[in-house]
Image (cartoon, rainbow, N blue to C red):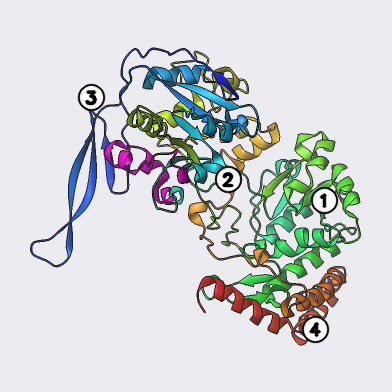
Amino acid sequence: MNKKVYNIMAFSAASAMLLCGCSSGNSSVTETSASASVSVETSVPSETSAEESVTVTERVVPPMDTTPITLSLYVDDPEYAVAFDTLVAQEIIARTGVTLEIIVPEDETGLDTMLESGEIPDLIYAGERTDELIENGTLIELDGYNEKVGEFFTEMYGENIDSLRADDRKLYTFGTGGSTPSQFTAEGTFQIQYAVLAELGYPEIKTLDQLGDCLRQYKELHPNSNGLLLCGGPQQKWLDTVSLRINYLLGCPDDGEFIVNEETGEAVYKWTDERTGRIVKWLNQMYNDGILDEKSFSLKHAAYIARISEGNVSAIADFYEDYPSAEETLGEYDKIYCPIEVTLEEGTAVPFLADYGDFAVADGIGITTACEEPERAFRFLDWWCSDEAQKLVNYATEDINTEFDPASETYYKDTGAGLYAEPFPMRGLTEKNADGEYYSAAVNKHIVEYTEPQTAAAEAYGVTLLAEMFPQMNELPVYTRTLISDMEIHALSEEGILLESLGTYIKTEVQNAIMLPVEEFDAKWNEIVDWCNSNGAQNLSDIMTERVQKDMGIK
């Protein structure tokens, strides 16, 4: 078999370590010097009622065996194969007695070669090929071990554990890549230079009016600055920097040219919505006040990026992936952009960090039929799901490093903290432990890498992570329906033809309306809405409402 093997000498355990106590939902684990008592709710028939009553039974889990043992682990993705010889790895061995022998394929045929050879390791991470190993019987079922000795596996994944189940509804692997849907960055409705925020004393900017006031104040202090720059020339940038911003300003997800009522499924062509008119009217006012850059609708994309690169544009409305080259050119950290959540009306929440219902825990490590100590292997991976283990693998501890400083840029390299993420069990990126600290080393490293202006802004706004300035996932609705932007719309369908004809008109006429004198705007906007209604906007809305409601199961 073609393979590379990292052989690690066993690090003897000085003593057996106590497992940390955890509790979640209807079960609890209590710390004990001998064994863990896990309270489990079970339903039994009531003698006095036809209904079922709940009784609590106690499952006693013996302490984890920490005698030295070596388990072989095949990792099909070399990117995730980290030698088990760091300070963190040595501490893992000390606490569990388990030394991992990491096996790495030399080429993309490694998994097939291994299976054909019959030299099956104790543990396998096969990634997207996990189903093959389930079908051919290489991996063992984990449910029995979880019910018998599991302490932390179910607690970590909660309801999301079901997404790990195979077609037969059984568990064959632990998860990886995060136990919950989470992200630690947010794009923002707009992005504003850190220099602007700092000079204005880090003002509250939650609404369009507040943003406009800030840009006017900064313009007064710096008359030669360009306030707000959009890119409405190229079609895609018109959609990115103008059209989509309307959805965000109204607290709605990306439904393309529509605003959807989440309760009824009604889809409205947004350019006929009265609130859209108020947003466009604000842009008209900004244009007449000299805040909205007069070249916002004439620049080609390259010229748009070049203009940002000059460092004189106070605010933009874009996706980060489109302007990093401009920020790199700037060189000055206070000239780069801070994402901000801005809405038309105060109290509206923009779903940047929402759960869009498509999260599934990725298949992680499975235990093979060749493993001679399957329960020991399960206990080891189950321990990896515990708070104790998650703190250790993400941040190391004072015990193994006298210079314990997770804020140091070299700390993670020196200790191995944060290296053992995939393919092992991982908490969600933005989950916090009982001490209010992020589990993930990736988040902490992201914070450590903040520039001085970013750190100053975070401190001024009272957050650790800049994304904390936005509504968090648990404060937002879960979007289980298909967004209209993800629906397939054929160009020659009725809705496709209407979208094309209305969209061409809207792009030209809305831009013209923005650049009109203030006193002429209202009449022009009424003209735009009347034209849309006379040219199929309501019919288009009806068609998309039917599609959305069908997707939601309403009709």
Mark 3 or mark 1, whichever is nearer to me: 3
What residue appears at the point 73 percent right and 51 percent down from the top-left corner?
319
Under mark 3, the amino acid is Ser
Task: Answer whether labels 3 and 1 touch (C-beta < 8 Å).
Answer: no
Mark 1 or mark 4, whichever is nearer to me: 4
Residue with the mark numbered 4: 531
x and y percentages locating residue 540 in the rendered image? 70, 80
Residue with the mark numbered 3: 33
Residue with the mark numbered 2: 183
Instruction: Using the image as rendered, state which of residue 543 and residue 395 is in the foreground.
Output: 543
Q: Earlier in the sequence, mark 2 or mark 1?
A: 2
Residue with the mark numbered 1: 220
Q: Earlier in the sequence, mark 4 or mark 3?
A: 3
Under mark 4, the amino acid is Trp
Task: Answer whether labels 4 and 3 touch (C-beta < 8 Å).
Answer: no
554 is higher (above) or lower (below) than 146 = below
Count of labels in the image: 4
Q: Earlier in the sequence, mark 3 or mark 1?
A: 3
